Amino acid sequence: FYSGSAYMGSDNRMYFGAMDGLASFYPHLVNMKSHRLSGVHVSNLTMMNSPVRYDPQAGKDNLLDAHVYRAALIHIPRRCNVVSFGFSTPEYSDPQRVRYDCLMTRCDKDWRSTDNGRMVSYTNLRPGKHLLRMKAYFEGDEENYAYNEIVVKVQAPWYLTAWAFLLYILVLSSLIAALSVWRKRRLKAERDRIRLDMFSNITQEIRTPLFLVLSPLKK
């Protein structure tokens, strides 16, 4: 609805101007009983206390795949430590009684309530894919709820990316190869030393008897 586009007629009928036309109803005819809400979605998104909006001209640089209330995928940059979600539902008969619960997979063990507000915040989400599950219901009627979910992908820091792990593998492989070459050279040097010692011992054993034999002859 447009702000300020409201009017009450002489017969107490209320009129509201909307993007798609004019809506009107009699307040006394509104059914105030609990009923299943028609839907729930993320209506507000902030990262590091800054609002995030979808820009059709930004292309792949968008953190959302569509406008926030229609988004099915949210990307969170690696340097973002705080992200907040705001929820809403198209309920106008008794909005004060609407309650919102949410659950972030890999983070929450159980559903968490937004209390009397519509916002929930998360800090230091683990890198990878999460699923933000949300539901809205009237207070006291938790079984009769509207449900929605949205994919949240948290970008990994550079040292946890696929390229980083590839680099780790290459470095580790190089270290193993270098260690193998060093070990082979050490073993070869050890064998050469043993052979030289054996040759020296054999030569000494041969020279000793010859010396004993030749020494009297020289005299």
Image: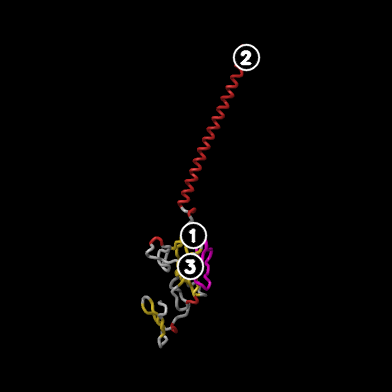
Looking at this view, is 216 or 126 the one in front? 216
Helix, strand or loop status at disc 2: helix
Sequence-wise, which precedes: disc 2 or disc 1?
Answer: 1
- Residue 9 is situated, as x and y percent measured from the top left of the image, at 40, 86
How far is the residue under mark 3 from the one under mark 2? 104 Å
Residue 215 marker: 2
User: Left of 205 or right of it: where is 38?
Assistant: left
Percent of width and height locating residue 204: 59, 22
In the image, what residue type sits under mark 3? Phe
User: Label 3: which residue?
Assistant: 85
Residue located beneath label 1 in the image:
79
Residues at badges 2 and 1 in contact (C-beta under 8 Å)? no
Residue 106 magenta-highlighted = yes
Marks 3 and 1: CB-CB under 8 Å? no
Q: Residue at x 42, y 86 (%)?
A: 12
Q: Residues within 10 Å of mark 2 (few under 14, many from 20)?
A: few
The quarter of the image holding the C terminus is top right
Looking at numbered disc 1 in the image, what kind of residue is underneath it?
Arg
Tell me where the magenta segment starts and ends, as one range: 101-126
Q: Nearer the viewer, residue 17 or 89?
A: 17
Query: What amino acid is at disc 2?
Result: Ser
For marks 2 and 1, give the CA distance: 89 Å
Query: Is residue 112 within the magenta segment?
Result: yes
**Alpha-carbon distance for marks 3 and 1?**
18 Å
